[in-house]
Each structure stands twice: as structure tokens, then as C-alpha cells.
């Protein structure tokens, strides 16, 4: 599990290398559909996490109080999201 901007910066070169490998694989005929879908999902999630980390770093750069306020907001939102069912949870497909 990533733990903040430092971990994301550490993982970034690996993500870039993985991107190169996948681009070459696509050029040679593509990926199996399930893997392609998973790669697309991970790419979107990584980009969103990176944008969030960049915003948090900007806030944290303004001081300890600002950083703690940002963390408080993020903790509150995360706590709320953990307490409610995920969209579509419990739905049955017919």
C-alpha cells in the first residue's frame, strides 16, 4: 500500500517502465482483454492518486497547521466512505 507522496515518487519509475513494456506489447498485438481492462483501471487510479498527492503536497508546503487540516479533511472523507456501502454493493444482476 502506498503511504504518501514519497512512496508514489518511489513507485513512479516502476510505473513508467511498466508503461513502456505495455506499450510495446500493445504494438505487438495487444494484451488479453482482462489484463487490458485491469491496466486501464490501474492507470486511472494511479493518475488520480498522483493528482491528490500533488494537491496535498501544495497544501503541506504552507505549514504544519495547513498540513494537519488537509489530513483531517482526508481522514474524515475516508472514514465516511469506509462506513457506507460502495455504489452498487448488494445489487444482483439479472
Image: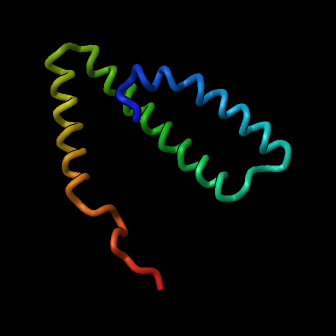
Q: Residue at x 65, y 58 (%)?
A: 34
Residue furthest to the front in view is 1
Residue furthest to the right in view is 28
Q: x and y percent of residue 22 in the render? A: 72, 39
The answer to whether 64 is drawn above or below residue 43 in the figure is: above
On the image, which quarter does residue 77 sit in? top left
The answer to whether 85 is drawn above or below residue 51 in the figure is: below
Q: x and y percent of residue 59 in the render? A: 27, 22
Q: Residue at x 34, y 64 (%)?
A: 87
Q: Residue at x 66, y 52 (%)?
A: 36
Q: x and y percent of residue 63 in the render? A: 20, 13
On the image, which quarter does residue 15 sit in? top right
Q: Residue at x 65, y 52 (%)?
A: 35
Residue furthest to the bottom in view is 94
Q: Check the image and tell me how it is coloured.
A: rainbow
The answer to whether 68 is drawn above or below residue 24 in the figure is: above
Q: x and y percent of residue 64 in the render? A: 17, 15
Quarter of the rendering occupied by the N terminus: top left
Taking 89 as reference, is 67 left or right? left
Numbered label tally = 0
On the image, which quarter does residue 73 sit in? top left
- 70 or 90: which is nearer to us? 90
Amino acid at each position: 500500500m502506498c503511504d504518501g507522496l514519497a512512496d508514489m515518487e518511489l513507485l513512479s519509475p516502476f510505473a513508467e517502465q511498466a508503461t513502456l513494456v505495455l506499450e510495446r506489447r500493445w504494438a505487438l498485438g495487444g494484451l488479453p482483454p482482462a489484463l487490458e481492462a485491469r491496466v486501464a483501471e490501474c492507470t486511472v487510479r494511479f493518475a488520480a492518486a498522483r493528482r491528490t498527492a500533488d494537491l496535498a503536497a501544495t497544501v503541506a508546503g504552507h505549514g504544519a497547521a495547513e498540513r494537519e487540516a488537509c489530513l483531517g479533511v482526508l481522514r474524515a472523507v475516508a472514514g465516511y466512505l469506509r462506513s457506507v456501502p460502495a455504489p452498487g454493493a448488494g445489487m444482483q444482476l439479472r
